[in-house]
Image (cartoon, rainbow, N blue to C red):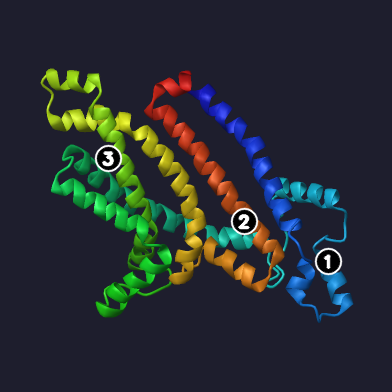
């Protein structure tokens, strides 16, 4: 197990290098002059040159790239143009809120999806199965920018049960977490149902039933663990997507996280901050997928010995 984990961690290095290079190229090779975008065409030439020099855009691209990689190693992502704070400092302030929201959304998705998927598989082609598939389809079909305002209208304005926006106690987390987790719950519940139905038809499940094990033991101890591999795959991919998808949800609920910070940086044309936010979100996606591989090895020992 230790060798497998070490191998997966070492594989992170070229992936992280590739992601950082791609982010650098996307930012620097986008058509148009970023200095003119930030200052406007009417800015004085001296102001443009000063900003271009502060961003090191007057240097050759290979030299900019080497300085970019050196900054990554030393933790220097540049300085925000408007707050004059280090980009890393601003990201570190916003990141805990995004992680809190993403984990809460994931928890809600699992709480809804696992029981719903298991019941749908066990009661296949019954009213419960059809109802669960309808709920899953509804969750997938309603986008965040529609579901969020609907939840605000229902629970914050009409019923006055929960706050509309901001980050405070548990009550502030409920609506944005529901908004973020509902779509994932729909995807996961359908995957749990399909995977569990496939496992329940295997010979070793029939053998377990023939030994006299209860249906509860057959489902929870023998079937569910084997059915989790494709579910974990979707979970890892979707959790990475949650980090990027928080941009819409954080904007709707004025949640002070990394997604909202990214949108504010884009609106303010804060070039270094946009690059830093995109880079951190990309790294988060890579790290989550690496953790997914490690969970594979725990759930199915054949993977780490393969």
Q: Around disc 1, counting alpha carbons within 10 Å, would you say few (fewer than 14), some (14 to 19), or many (20 or more)?
A: some
- Residue where numbered disc 3 is placed: 193
Q: Real-space Cα distance between discs 1 and 2?
A: 21 Å
Q: In front of the other: label 2 or label 3?
A: 3
Choose between 280 and 87: the one closer to the eye: 280
Q: Residue pushed farthest bottom?
A: 42
- Residue where numbered disc 2 is placed: 278
Q: What element carries label 2?
A: helix
Left or right: residue 101 versus residue 116 is right
Q: Residue pushed farthest front?
A: 125
Residue located at (60% from left, 60% from top): 91
Q: Residue 53 sits in which quadrant?
A: bottom right
Residue 168: tell me if it is visible: no
Q: Is mark 1 on a helix, strand or loop?
A: helix
- Looking at the image, is 33 positioned above or below residue 92? below
Residue located at (82% from left, 65% from top): 54
Residue 89 has which mark? none
Left or right: residue 64 versus residue 230 is right
């Amino acid at each position: 197990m230790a060798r497998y984990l070490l191998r997966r961690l070492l594989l992170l290095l070229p992936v992280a290098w590739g992601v950082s290079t791609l982010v650098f190229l996307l930012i620097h090779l986008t058509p148009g002059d970023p200095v003119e975008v930030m200052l406007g065409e009417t800015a004085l030439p001296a102001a443009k040159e000063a900003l271009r020099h502060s961003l090191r855009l007057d240097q050759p691209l290979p030299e900019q790239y080497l300085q970019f990689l050196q900054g990554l190693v030393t933790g220097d992502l540049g300085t925000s143009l408007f707050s004059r704070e280090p980009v890393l400092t601003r990201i570190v302030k916003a990141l805990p809120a995004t992680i809190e929201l993403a984990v809460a959304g994931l928890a809600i998705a699992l709480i809804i999806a696992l029981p719903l998927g298991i019941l749908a598989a066990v009661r296949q082609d019954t009213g419960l199965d059809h109802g669960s598939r309808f709920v899953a389809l509804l969750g997938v079909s309603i986008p965040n920018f529609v579901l969020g305002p609907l939840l605000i209208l229902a629970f914050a304005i009409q019923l006055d049960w929960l706050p509309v926006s901001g980050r405070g106690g548990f009550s502030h987390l409920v609506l944005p977490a529901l908004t973020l987790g509902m779509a994932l719950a729909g995807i996961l519940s359908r995957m749990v149902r399909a995977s569990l139905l496939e496992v329940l038809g295997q010979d070793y499940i029939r053998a377990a039933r023939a030994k006299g094990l209860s249906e509860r033991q057959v489902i929870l101890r023998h079937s569910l663990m084997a059915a989790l591999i494709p579910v974990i795959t979707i979970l890892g991919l979707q959790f990475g997507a949650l980090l990027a998808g928080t941009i819409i949800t954080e904007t709707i609920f004025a949640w002070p996280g990394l997604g909202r910070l990214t949108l504010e940086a884009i609106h303010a044309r804060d070039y270094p901050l946009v690059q830093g936010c995109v880079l951190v979100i990309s790294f988060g996606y890579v790290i989550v997928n690496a953790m997914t591989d490690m969970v594979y090895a725990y759930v199915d020992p054949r993977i780490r010995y393969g």
